[in-house]
Image (tube, coloured by chain):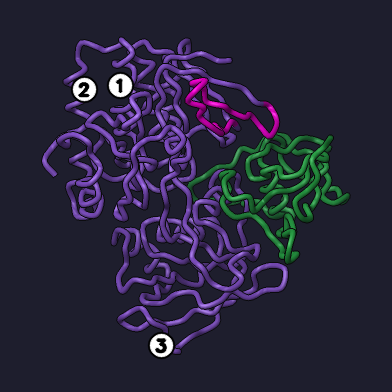
Chain colours: A green, B purple
């Protein structure tokens, strides 16, 4: 699949099952159980959220769940650390605008 | 509530070794790690380690992670591991560590001893537009390429010619990414020559005494202006543009210590170790008698020393709880001996300098 490394001199990638998910309503494919952020990046998505005050684009940064840069709305839940949240079939991933609203 | 003898926070090289030691002498152990897989940064390392056979020399990092997990697996009955689980707070009054698995499933752990092996996080340098998607931490880029096999971009510029900057530049090339160059503020390469030579042989320029002036791009990174500095580190006015879609930052790490701050551990600011680090005794025990520390959380070093510190901390914690093996002294002496051997060379000078300031008792050898 495009966006994923196919030939590597040292590593051999054994990906899990390929599943469909949705980014802002657009159907995409990624590997089940691998972080959401990886699947998005491989699909060419770079902007994951927009900042509350200046509407700046933010993407991936630390990949270890510490920096808050990759927060997105996942299945209606805002501020999800997409770099360490596993992708599941049918997930609805959305660009987060501002701080996000918590569910009641 | 989950109850255990030893709670290990962080399942990287230090945490896994602490868990192996503690469980091997009979303690029950819970390991929590925020990542989806155990192994910490080891699982991202494609290069072969140095040193002696005991420190896994000649073995690639990701293979070492498998070796440690196999070793831990031998004590399976006494060990519980939780991935995608973040320890989010220590509550001294209730004496529990609160954890969250995923984003919403909270639980408490009560442990008789706690080993903090939380590692480190990447530092950032300030420049206009450093928030643009495409500006990534070096560790993050390793995660992309080496753990999940995702292409990080087409053309990358690296900031930092320390070991991480050099190694990740080489790994970018392995992943088929063009590396435009390595920019280094200092007048010399900070990492090992063997790593620098590998990237130079492949034609990657290293710009010493240069830094990032500004990143460019509307929605995502499109390029970077690099500026040359004089002997004092001031801009000379010389600058050039580099077209790239990845700017990789390898400008140092700082220890992750939130839990130890909450536990009231005595800290000291030691620049050679990456910032604030906990004061510890000769068994890696902090000033809060319930807490031990190991690995990068105790001071930025590398995986080989993290593994040994983890062994010291895990063995000490379990022994304190009554699982002291007959050969305790022998093992402690051996681990410290190996640690000092690792730090003896020229690359260890900075760390040794830092370690002068962090022991609450006479250091295990004279520093």
According to the image, label 3 marks what residue? B236
| Comparing labels 3 and 2, the label whose residue is closer to the camera | 3
Callout 2 touching callout 1 (CB < 8 Å):
yes
Q: Magenta span: helix, strand or loop, mainly?
A: strand
Q: Quadrant of residue B359?
A: top left
* Chain bearing mark 1: B
Locate the C terminus of chain A by quadrant: top right
Q: Nearer the viewer, residue B165 or B95?
A: B95
Residue B287 at x, y percent in the picture: 31, 32
Q: Quick one: A14 or B135, which is closer to the camera?
A: B135
Instruction: Say few, some or many: other residues with alpha carbon within 10 Å of mark 2 (under 14 / 14 to 19 / 20 or more).
Output: some
Q: Which residue is mark 2?
A: B331
Q: Secondary structure at mark 1?
A: helix
Badges 3 and 2, same chain:
yes
Sequence order check, earlier mark of 3 and 2: 3
* Neighbour tally class for label 1: few under 14, some 14-19, many 20 plus, Cα within 10 Å: many
Residue on which disc 1 sits? B315
Q: Give the extent of the magenta segment.
A: B85-105
The outermost residue toward the front is B93
């Amino acid at each position: 699949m495009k966006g994923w490394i196919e030939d590597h001199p040292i590593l051999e990638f054994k990906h899990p099952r390929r599943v469909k998910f949705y980014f802002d309503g657009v159907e995409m494919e990624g590997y089940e159980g691998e972080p959401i952020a990886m699947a998005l990046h491989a699909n060419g998505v770079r902007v994951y959220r927009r900042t509350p005050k200046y509407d700046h684009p933010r993407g991936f940064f630390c990949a270890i769940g510490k920096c808050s840069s990759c927060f997105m709305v996942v299945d209606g839940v805002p501020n999800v650390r997409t770099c360490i949240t596993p992708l599941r079939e049918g997930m609805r991933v959305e660009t987060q605008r501002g701080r996000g609203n918590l569910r009641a | 509530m989950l109850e255990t003898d030893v709670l290990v926070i962080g399942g990287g090289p230090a945490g896994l070794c602490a868990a192996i030691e503690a469980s091997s002498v009979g303690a029950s152990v819970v390991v929590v790690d925020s990542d989806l897989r155990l192994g910490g940064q080891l699982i991202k390392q494609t290069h072969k380690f140095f040193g002696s056979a005991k420190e896994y020399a000649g073995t690639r990092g990701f293979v070492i992670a498998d070796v440690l997990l196999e070793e831990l697996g031998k004590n399976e009955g006494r060990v519980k591991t939780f991935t995608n689980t973040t320890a989010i707070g220590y509550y001294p009054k209730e004496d529990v560590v609160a954890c969250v698995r995923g984003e919403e499933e909270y639980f408490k752990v009560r442990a008789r001893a706690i080993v903090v092996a939380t590692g480190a996080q990447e530092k950032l340098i300030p420049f206009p537009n450093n928030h643009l998607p495409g500006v990534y931490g070096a560790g993050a880029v390793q995660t992309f390429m080496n753990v999940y096999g995702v292409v990080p971009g087409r053309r990358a510029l690296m900031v930092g010619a320390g070991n991480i900057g050099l190694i990740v530049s080489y790994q970018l090339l392995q992943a088929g990414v063009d590396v435009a160059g390595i920019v280094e503020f200092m007048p010399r390469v900070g990492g090992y020559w063997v790593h620098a030579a590998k990237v130079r042989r492949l034609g990657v320029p290293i710009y010493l005494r240069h830094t990032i002036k500004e990143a460019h791009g509307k929605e995502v990174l499109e390029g970077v202006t690099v500026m040359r500095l004089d002997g004092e580190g001031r801009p000379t006015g010389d600058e050039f543009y580099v077209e790239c879609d990845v700017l990789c930052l390898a400008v140092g790490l700082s220890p992750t210590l939130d839990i130890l701050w909450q536990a009231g551990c005595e800290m000291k600011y030691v620049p050679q170790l990456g910032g604030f680090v906990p004061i510890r005794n000769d068994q890696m025990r902090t000033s809060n008698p319930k807490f031990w520390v190991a690995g990068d959380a105790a001071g930025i070093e590398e995986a080989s020393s993290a593994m040994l510190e983890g062994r010291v901390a895990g063995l000490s914690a379990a022994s304190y709880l009554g699982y002291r093996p007959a050969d305790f002294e022998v093992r402690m002496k051996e681990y410290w001996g190996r640690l000092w051997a690792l730090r003896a060379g020229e690359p260890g000078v900075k760390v040794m300098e830092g370690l002068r300031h962090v022991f609450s008792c006479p250091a295990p050898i004279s520093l």
